[in-house]
Amino acid sequence: MSSLHERHLAVSPDWLALYYQQPLEITHGEGRHVWDANGRRYLDFFGGILTTMTAHALPEVTKAVSEQAGRIIHSSTLYLNRPMVELAERVATLSGIPDARVFFTTSGTEANDTALLLATTYRGSNQVLAMRNSYHGRSFSAVGITGNNAWSPTSLSPLQTLYVHGGVRARGPYEHLSDAEFIKACVADLEDLLGHTRTPAALIAEPIQGVGGFTSPPDGLYAAFRRVLDRHGVLWISDEVQTGWGRTGEHFWGWQAHGENGPPDILTFAKGIGNGMSIGGVVARAEVMNCLDANSISTFGGSPVTMAAGLANLSYLLEHDLQGNARRVGGLLIERLRAVGAGSSCVREVRGRGLMIGIELVKPGTDEANPQAAAAVLEAAREGGLLIGKGGGHNTSVLRIAPPLSLTIPEAEEGAKILAEALRSVD
């Protein structure tokens, strides 16, 4: 055990988990690579949990941060803030929400907290619909709407949460149905649920479930839900903390795969927009955003430094068409990984889109989740020079692959090769 690991254990909570049997200290990064304290280089396919969205040490972002820090680091939302206004203008336009207002926070958890505050206040209800296998953050209210028991340390909550079918396509009572039948069954379940309850404030859903193992419904499910929700006056909150900014390749926002009946009422974002800086936020139409009748500010949300980083990062992403790169390189990577999975006895499914890919592992010859294999592959990939993540609602048995969106074809090929070797080591 390293001295730093010993010091970590002495001052950190027991539940503050670390990856790897011998935890890794990352000292610096560049592009799609990071280095540890021993000087070893790794190809990074997890990006600090989908947060280093464009690249490590991206010159445009580091320059913007440095220049802004040299002027002023902090002022709070009590003063006019040019970088915050400029980024809000761009996010409002990109969101697809008409007459949009933007409020910045410091994390996705805080963004979802704010969305819940808005929805419950606007609707006058503390009842919320959420998806099974979901994850929305680690605060008291966000834990209360998280449908994944591995990330729900308490059943206490200020909200009454009802869980809906649909977030997981390949498991559960409707897995045998066709996509059209699956959507029809989930809509019928939602209709039935609403017939037995008081009217909820909102449905909150990740278009692709992140911590849940990169699971998703067929395209169009949330559009079908929207027709039902609108009849009942229930708001739709799209949690885009992991799916936003073009990561899925096919769309800029995950909700656009379900956009037949228009954009969500509220959209939350975080992670990748800051490329490592602490930015989260909420977009909502003005009527919903302005429903609060008491004061509310943010001390650190909208910080001049983080806003400067977000502006530079968003500009780079758009100017270099990183969404298109995610579609092209991600398509190649998932094709390679499906070929690898076809030859592995422990791979149940390779799923995802763009540069958001999950590999679900099971015990050979069964449909039983295999968290031990996932942990072993994580270790073997590290030994091969590749960093990946893991998750999943079925005992953390899914490998999570989400590189920076500037990933190159040679790097995708290299990563797929290392993963193939890591999977072979546990077959």
Image (spheres, grey):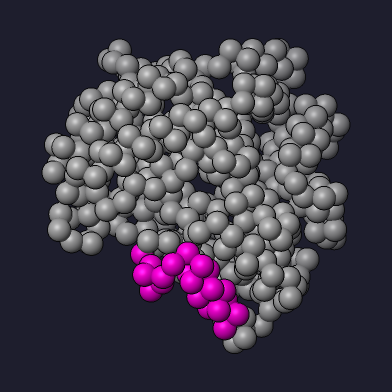
Magenta run includes residue 173:
yes
Q: Which residues are magenta?
A: 171-192
Magenta run includes residue 395:
no
Question: Is residue 308 positioned above or below 130 on the image?
Answer: above
Residue 327 relative to residue 346: left or right? right
Question: Is residue 190 positioned above or below 385 on the image?
Answer: below
Question: Is residue 293 positioned above or below 250 on the image?
Answer: below
Residue occupying image coordinates x 31% and y 42%: 338
Question: For the image shown, how many numbered marks are present on the structure?
Answer: 0
Residue occupying image coordinates x 62% and y 86%: 195
Residue 30 relative to residue 96: left or right? left
The percent coordinates of residue 270 (x first, y second) are 60, 40
Residue 109 relative to residue 409: left or right? right
Where residue 320 sits, quadrant-wise, is top right
Can residue 167 be seen from the camera position used here?
Answer: yes
Which quarter of the rendered picture does the N terminus lie within? top left
Can residue 132 be seen from the camera position used here?
Answer: no
The percent coordinates of residue 163 (x first, y second) are 51, 71
Q: Main secondary structure of the magenta part?
A: helix
